[in-house]
Image (spheres, helix red, strand yellow):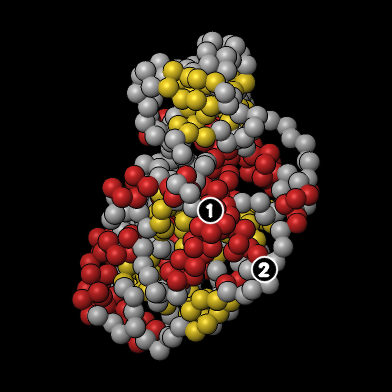
């Protein structure tokens, strides 16, 4: 397949390979001569489009023509612009099909670590969470010393540097505390050492108040200003945590325990055709098993938000989605930024023209299930099914937010590629086979085969089986093998 029309109402073809000037395409009885070189993932006009007319892809408008477009023209940022503007008022129109997702009769399982609080982990790691950025390097050194010990039955000792926890005010400090406290409680961590400096805003005693109940044998604290030798005392505490965790064992648990975050980044023109719909199909399969999926990137819902709003399970959830979307638009306006700024340079190079186009591809990761809950930034998933969590499009910030919300794994679709990983296994899913073949050290799963003859239903089952194997510890992701495990925190206000 060299090109495709996604929806009967579309005004464009999506090219699935590079085309050179002078080559021709035959489609629907018409012959289009390529007028200039056009890269894979970009769009070709099927007919003339007048100035101000809407351009459709996926059956929805992706923008308006800002100059006349002729049949056979390359359709991109030079002749199409966003049709969006400002905050909007919405009307709840429930999508009845979303409520019809049937529960699977065949129960799938994985091998996980049951925790005392009823949650299940998929890794048995020791985590070092520092309350303040001043001691990032101390935490790094403690993690290095811990890994040198080679603790029995431990999948690794990891720290997560960040620049915050001191000189923060208001919501910024609360957000930092919420994310860090959720990571302390994450079931993938068999034990956690919380390191504080001693003089920071987010000092240990205050931070403990955000934790709620915790297992004292699995969460230890050290204020390094008070320690005689912080390295010795920290490694002693790690040894205590490792001693408790070495008795942990995997056991068979239903797939309903699994929580998976959904994220895209470095997208291209195939993201909304291959990888994102594949993740959406996976999401529906996991939810049918009683599991949970989590979608974020609020700015990349702009232009497609009504698709999610109309899948809200009830009016209350609908209102929460409206508040989240308009609240993020107001955040842009508050900082005098354009709400509907075009996608990143990499997205544009990959064939994405407007935010509407990016968003219509992005929301496909949520499949067709009802939206059961909406969480603030730093919120934690408590309901099965599909949840939305407030967060920006930034890859590191949003993957951190998904992990803190309880995701055991994040599925990360990409058409351009990226090596990074979050605190949890971060599965890179390529939109095209070229990227999969070229970046073997980055990409874990190839969705590009969907335009090469592989059936969506079959590949979605393959992805579900892969994720269950990953959860069972049978396979690891590239980010795990490379030691790429990072966090990033959202900042809105001032720093003293």
The residue that mark 1 highlights is 455
Question: Helix or strand or loop: what does disc 2 sit on?
Answer: loop
The residue that mark 2 highlights is 104
Q: What is the CA distance from the residue labelled 1 to the residue labelled 2?
A: 20 Å
- Indicate left or right for 213 with 17 as reference: right
Q: Nearer the viewer, mark 1 or mark 2?
A: 1
State the residue at coordinates (63%, 43%). Answer: 324
Q: Quadrant of residue 144?
A: bottom left
Residue 390 percent coordinates (x, y): 57, 48
Q: Quadrant of residue 39?
A: top left
- Indicate left or right for 141 with 419 as reference: left
From the viewer's side, name the closer residue of 212 and 202: 212
Query: Which quadrant, please, contains the C terminus?
Result: top left
Regarding residue 40, the answer to whether it shows in the image is yes
Looking at this view, name the residue that lies furthest to the front: 29
- Indicate left or right for 62 with 226 as reference: right
State the residue at coordinates (30%, 85%). Answer: 152
From the viewer's side, name the closer residue of 29 and 404: 29
Residue 475's place in the image compared with 245, above or below, is above
From the viewer's side, name the closer residue of 339 and 215: 339
- Label 1: how many residues lie within 10 Å, few (<14), some (14-19) or many (20+)? few
């Amino acid at each position: 397949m060299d090109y495709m029309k996604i929806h009967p109402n579309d005004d464009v073809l999506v090219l699935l390979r590079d085309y050179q000037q002078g080559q021709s395409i035959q489609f629907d009885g018409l012959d289009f001569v390529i007028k200039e070189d056009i890269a894979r993932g970009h769009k070709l006009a099927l007919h003339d489009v007048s100035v101000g007319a809407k351009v459709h892809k996926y059956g929805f408008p992706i923008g308006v023509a800002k100059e006349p477009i002729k049949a056979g023209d390359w359709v991109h940022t030079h002749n199409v612009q966003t049709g969006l503007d400002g905050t909007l008022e919405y009307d709840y129109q429930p999508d009845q099909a979303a409520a019809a997702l049937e529960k699977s009769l065949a129960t799938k399982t994985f091998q996980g670590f049951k925790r005392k609080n009823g949650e299940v982990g998929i890794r048995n790691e020791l985590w070092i969470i520092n309350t303040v950025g001043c001691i990032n390097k101390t935490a790094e050194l403690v993690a290095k010393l811990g890994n040198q010990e080679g603790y029995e039955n431990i999948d690794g000792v990891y720290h997560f540097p960040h620049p915050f926890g001191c000189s923060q005010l208001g919501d910024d400090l609360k957000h930092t505390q919420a994310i860090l406290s959720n990571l302390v409680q994450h079931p993938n961590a068999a034990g956690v050492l919380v390191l504080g400096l001693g003089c920071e805003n987010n000092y240990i005693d205050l931070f403990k108040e955000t934790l709620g109940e915790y297992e004292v044998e699995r969460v230890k604290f050290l204020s390094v200003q008070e320690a005689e030798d912080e390295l010795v005392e920290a490694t002693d505490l790690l040894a205590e945590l490792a001693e408790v965790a070495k008795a942990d064992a995997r056991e068979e648990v239903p797939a309903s325990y699994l929580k998976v975050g959904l994220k895209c980044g470095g997208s291209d023109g195939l993201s909304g055709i291959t990888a994102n719909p594949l993740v959406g199909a996976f999401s529906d399969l996991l939810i049918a098993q009683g599991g949970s999926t989590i979608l974020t990137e609020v700015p990349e819902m702009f232009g497609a938000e009504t698709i999610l709003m109309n899948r809200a399970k009830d009016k209350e959830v609908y209102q929460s989605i409206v508040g989240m979307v308009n609240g993020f638009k107001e955040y842009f306006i508050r900082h005098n930024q354009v709400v509907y700024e075009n996608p990143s340079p990499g997205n544009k190079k990959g064939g994405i023209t407007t935010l509407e186009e990016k968003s219509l591809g992005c929301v496909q990761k949520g499949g067709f299930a009802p939206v059961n809950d909406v969480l603030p930034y730093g919120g934690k998933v408590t309901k099965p099914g599909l949840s939305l969590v407030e967060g920006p499009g930034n890859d590191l910030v949003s993957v951190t937010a998904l992990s803190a919300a309880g995701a055991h794994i994040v599925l990360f679709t990409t058409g351009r590629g990226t090596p990074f990983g979050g605190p949890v296994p971060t599965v890179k899913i390529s939109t095209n086979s070229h990227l999969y073949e070229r970046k073997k050290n980055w990409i874990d799963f190839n969705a590009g085969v969907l335009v090469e003859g592989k059936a969506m239903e079959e590949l979605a089952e393959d992805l579900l089986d892969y994720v269950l194997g990953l959860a069972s510890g049978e396979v690891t992701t590239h980010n795990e093998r490379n030691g790429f495990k990072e966090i990033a925190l959202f900042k809105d206000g001032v720093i003293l």
